[in-house]
Image (spheres, rainbow, N blue to C red):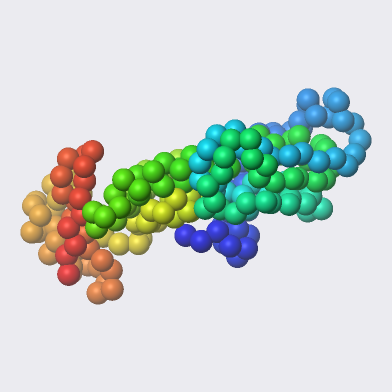
Amino acid sequence: MVMNDITMKLHADRLIRMALEEDISSEDVSTNAVMPCARQGKVDLICKQDGVIAGMDVFSRVFELLDERTVTESVCRDGDFVRAGQKLAVVRGDIRVLLSGERVALNYLQRMSGIATCTHDMVKLLEGTGITLLDTRKTMPNCRIFEKYAVRVGGGSNHRYNLSDGVLLKDNHIGAAGGVTKAVQMAKAYAPFVRKIEVEAGCKLHAAYIFVH
């Protein structure tokens, strides 16, 4: 999953709007109380912990959806390793927009950066082993596009994005089919030739995937 302008407008904008609507159901009472009229201002985005940054475009997009005139000047890019105290960006615009969008923007940036940092740390541990680190579909609802992107930023690889991407036969599928052999035979008969068929093996904490051709 690549977070470019097309992906942002086609998929991410709708989800970001939903997050904003969840946080601002009717109005931002606190902001409207202290800032009844539009006034221009700026805020600095400061890093509070060392790690790999991810979600800078999503962060800025939150404010742009509230007011397209908002301008974010980033001094780092997704994938950069940042340090506590480092300035990451400056956001300029209507102070009401900056206050109302702050929490949603930070929620995305913090979660995505946390995932990217954790992924980066695990990828470093696996260096030289020949093991590829994959993610799963066990993502927060409506956050998959952001979380899987963050895994890529951290150096990991994406597995299936959704249930249509390929066949993954787990214990429940195998039980329903009546065994591994039967499940694989049925999958081969049903799935198009170009679809990959995988069988999950191992315990829940240490799963492995066996590729079937």
Please tell me which residue is depicted at 89% across the width and 31% down the height of the picture. 36
In this view, the residue in front, 37 or 187, is 37
Q: Quadrant of the C terminus?
A: bottom left
Please tell me which residue is depicted at 13% across the width and 47% down the height of the picture. 175
Above or below 168: residue 106: above
Above or below 134: residue 206: above
Please tell me which residue is depicted at 58% across the width and 62% down the height of the picture. 4
Residue 164 drawn at (x, y percent): 36, 60
Tell me which corner region of the image, top left, top right, bottom left or bottom right, holds residue 99.
Answer: top right
Please tell me which residue is depicted at 24% across the width and 58% down the height of the picture. 130
Residue 115 drawn at (x, y percent): 45, 43
Instruction: Locate residue 89 relative to residue 39 in the image: left or right.
Output: left
* Total numbered circles: 0
Instruction: Locate residue 3 relative to residue 38 in the image: left or right.
Output: left
Observer able to see residue 62: no
In this view, the residue in front, 207 or 199, is 207
In this view, the residue in front, 195 or 57, is 57
Residue 34 drawn at (x, y percent): 86, 26
Observer able to see residue 152: yes
Above or below 108: residue 71: below
